[in-house]
Image: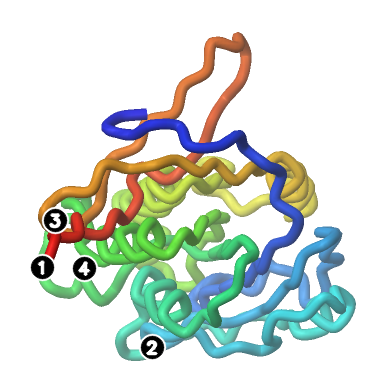
Amino acid sequence: MQNTKKHMISSLLAGAGVIFAVSPSNAADMPSRTTVKMTVTAVGVGYMRNATVQLAQDLTSDHAKAANALRPPLGYSGAYGSPYLSAVSLMKQWPDHHNRREIVMITDGIDPAVRTLGMWELNPNPNVDSASNIAQRTGTIIHTIYASGARRSDRNYWRATSGQMDMARLSDETGGKSFYLGLEDPVSYSPYLDKLQEILYNQYLLSFSAVPEKKSGMQRVKLSTPIAGVVLSSHDAVWVPALRQPR
């Protein structure tokens, strides 16, 4: 870790709140009924539209009820259909609790809200920056699953590649996992969900004492281990409040 001192031993997390956020602009390849096999986890289902998430099912421990809320996407993301601004909206509305906060975004990653501004396809997306910063500030982990768009323009190689790169960057910076099979849709989502279950079973809460500065802000964090063959995933940074000045 950089600029930090270890404060306590890691402890296994006991529960999580996971919301599946599905982009309405994607092809209706996702099954309308999917078995959600994540135990000790509250699961919700929502659909991204107009830079918001319309919850079809709020967080519930009844996984069958959550699975029944799944339906084929509408095929239209709305007038301002940024998947990353939708994630920002969801994180701002998430209720406070001590459990993990995780989002699984199923989308092509293409952001019409930015691409219509004339930016080059491979330029950094400021909406990804916003979603990443809020996720790291609130301790939210974002996983992404690539699903190709329904529109012909969404299958353009450069647009699709740009969207996939944005998704991968968001997951990487927030400690999540990005799933994709090139630019093709998966035959089944089951292997991805199985991997997510494995990830949830192997997450730990690491507490440490950060060195506060004069102003509140993000501080970079780097994790390492001397154990061979171990891969660590975490937020790239954490929010550290400003140093309290003596009165």
Question: Which of marks 2 and 3 precedes in the sequence?
Answer: 2
Q: Position of residue 190 (x, y in %)?
A: 79, 52
Question: Are discs 4 and 3 less than 8 Å apart at CB?
Answer: no
On the rendered structure, is 195 left or right of 163?
Answer: right
Query: How far separated are the C-alphas under marks 4 and 3?
Result: 8 Å
Q: Residues within 10 Å of mark 1 (few under 14, many from 20)?
A: few
Q: In whole angstroms, how far apart are the C-alphas of marks 3 and 2? A: 22 Å
Quadrant placement of the C terminus? bottom left
> Residue placed at 21% from the left, 68% from the top?
115
The span from disc 4 to disc 2 (Cα, nearest Å) is 15 Å
Image marks 4 and 1: residues in contact by CB distance under 8 Å = no
> How did the renderer colour the structure?
rainbow
> For residue 120, which numbered disc appears in the image?
3
Q: Residues within 10 Å of mark 2 (few under 14, many from 20)?
A: some
Q: Mark 2 highlights which residue?
A: 50
As measured in the structure, the alpha-carbon distance from the residue carrying label 1 to the one carrying label 3 is 7 Å
What's the residue at 66%, 68% (across, down)? 17
Residue at position x 34%, y 75% in the image: 85
Residue 220 position within the rendered picture, expressed as x and y whole percent measured from the top left: 28, 40
Nearer mark to the viewer, of 2 and 1: 2
Dot 2 and dot 1 residues touching (CB under 8 Å): no
Vertically, is 48 above or below 40?
below
| Residue 118 disc label | 1
Secondary structure of the residue carrying tag 1 is loop
Identify the residue under disc 4.
Answer: 115
